[in-house]
Image (spheres, rainbow, N blue to C red):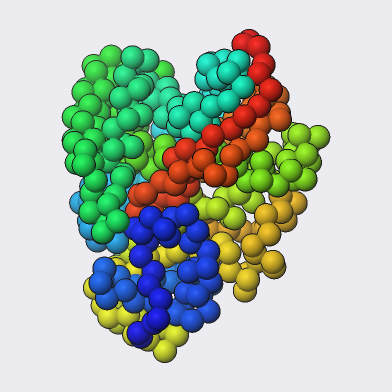
């Protein structure tokens, strides 16, 4: 039970290189307890997978962060069977078709953001591109007016920042309050005057005689924004950084853009934007010689599981041709990421456009900054240089 190393997911040093700690967790403390922060952690692939599937033992109803319970009433904080009608209802509004038809709009946004940086020959890839795209795509999908897109981008960023103790950083609570005030207004206006957008579809959707309540609609929109923006942003920036650091792999992708989805999947395995999701035990759980008591928070470390040598041969090698059959970057089981299709569309189009316009981009590994959130992992800043290119 006692260990001669500490795993603190909020430590800034941990964010820069979590992998030695993840390896020690998997090898020496596969059921790890942190007495200071009072949480447990599972890190081996099979354990994390099993816990995702066993929602009766590992409940989401007490929140999915180790540092507290948002009490959002969104489906991510529910278990089956309560979660299922809600997820089905939302699936009726947030359809593959509604995602796929966004492709031209996603490409248009990529062109617009790239036009703002291509001539300079250098930029911060996060601020200049990766942070803008997912937020504007979701705002577009929802039907939020263009002039509100910037705020919709900035509020969740504030809401997700954490201190090293796990406490909320300054501005975090107000970021969330702003979001919670904005969305009811958007839903109200769409209920009065429906348009061809997701906010209107959410107001109208009906399944087996059930409609979304206002509270459920608000909870879902907040979930989309907080769950879909930072993660996709980190995924894009992490992938470009990794390709820049592995020129042989980047060459393959440049020669065959059809490999972009393979590179993106390997990136999410190798450097998972969601480091973990938390659960709470509903009974005493004997595991690896320990007993996790009932009522304890447990972090399911997707980031560590995705580097488990028990599952992935040579896991610390970034190999875009690996084609790992499954990773846990989008979670697993009843809460498998609802936005995976959208995130995959965004990263594919983003990389197609970046590689077409500034193919020789090179990241400066000494200039990067890491995100200091709870469970979102990745860069806040990635300086890149490239041959200047004309606007289009
Ligand atoms: C790289 C990008 C993304 C990553 C790494 C990611 C990761 C995840 C993970 C790990 C879960 C499981 C949560 C759990 O089991 O407790 C999840 C759920 C979810 N994600 Fe994502 N996500 C991404 C993008 C998106 C996007 C773009 C959206 C929406 C537009 C989205 C919406 C959701 C929703 C609504 C859920 C909850 C589903 C449920 O409770 O049934 N995600 N995501």
Residue 308 higher or lower than 85, as above or below: below
Residue extending farthest right: 255
Relative height, residue 296 to residue 323 (above, below): below
Image spot of residue 118 (x, y percent): 60, 19
Q: Toward the viewer: 112 or 339?
A: 112
Identify the residue at image location x=23%, y=49%. 168
In the image, what residue occupies the spot 45% across and 29% down? 127
- Image side of residue 339 versus residue 285, left or right: right
Figure quadrant of residue 284: bottom left
Residue 80 lies, in percent from the top left, at 35, 59
Observer-nearest of 212 and 268: 268
Quadrant in the rendering for residue 314: bottom right
Quadrant including the N terminus: bottom left
Tell which residue pokes out farthest to the front in this image.
366
Residue 86: percent from left, percent from top: 33, 45
Number of marks in the image? 0
């Amino acid at each position: 039970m006692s260990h001669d190393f500490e795993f603190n997911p909020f430590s800034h040093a941990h964010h820069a290189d979590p992998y030695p700690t993840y390896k020690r967790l998997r090898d020496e403390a596969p059921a790890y307890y942190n007495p200071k922060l009072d949480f447990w952690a599972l890190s081996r692939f099979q354990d994390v997978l099993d816990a995702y599937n066993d929602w009766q033992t590992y409940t989401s109803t007490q929140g999915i962060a180790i540092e507290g319970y948002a009490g959002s009433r969104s489906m991510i904080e529910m278990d089956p069977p309560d979660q299922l009608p809600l997820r089905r209802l939302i699936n009726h509004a947030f359809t593959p078709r509604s995602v796929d038809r966004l492709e031209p709009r996603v490409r248009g946004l990529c062109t617009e953001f790239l036009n703002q940086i291509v001539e300079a020959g250098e930029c911060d890839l996060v601020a200049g591109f990766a942070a803008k795209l997912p937020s504007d795509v979701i705002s577009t999908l929802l039907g939020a007016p263009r002039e509100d897109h910037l705020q919709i981008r900035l509020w969740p960023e504030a809401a997700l920042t954490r201190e090293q103790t796990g406490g909320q950083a300054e501005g975090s609570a107000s970021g969330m309050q702003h979001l919670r005030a904005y969305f009811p207004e958007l839903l109200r206006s769409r209920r009065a005057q429906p348009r061809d957008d997701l906010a209107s579809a959410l107001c109208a959707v009906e399944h087996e005689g059930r409609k979304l309540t206002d509270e459920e609609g608000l909870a879902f929109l907040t979930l989309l924004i907080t769950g879909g923006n930072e993660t996709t942003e980190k995924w894009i920036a992490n992938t470009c950084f990794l390709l820049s650091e592995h020129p042989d792999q980047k060459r393959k992708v440049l020669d065959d853009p059809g490999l972009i989805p393979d590179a993106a999947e390997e990136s999410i395995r190798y450097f998972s934007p969601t480091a973990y999701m938390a659960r709470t035990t509903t009974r005493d759980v004997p595991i690896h010689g320990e007993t996790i008591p009932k009522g304890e928070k447990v972090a399911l470390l997707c980031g560590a599981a995705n580097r488990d040598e028990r599952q992935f041969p040579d896991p610390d090698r970034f190999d875009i041709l690996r084609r790992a059959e499954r990773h846990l970057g989008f979670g697993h089981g009843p809460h498998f990421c609802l936005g995976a299709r959208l995130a995959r569309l965004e990263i594919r189009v983003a990389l197609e456009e970046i590689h077409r316009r500034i193919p020789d981009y090179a990241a400066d590994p000494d200039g990067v900054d890491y995100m200091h959130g709870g469970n979102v992992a990745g860069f806040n800043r990635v300086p890149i240089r490239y041959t200047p290119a004309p606007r289009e």
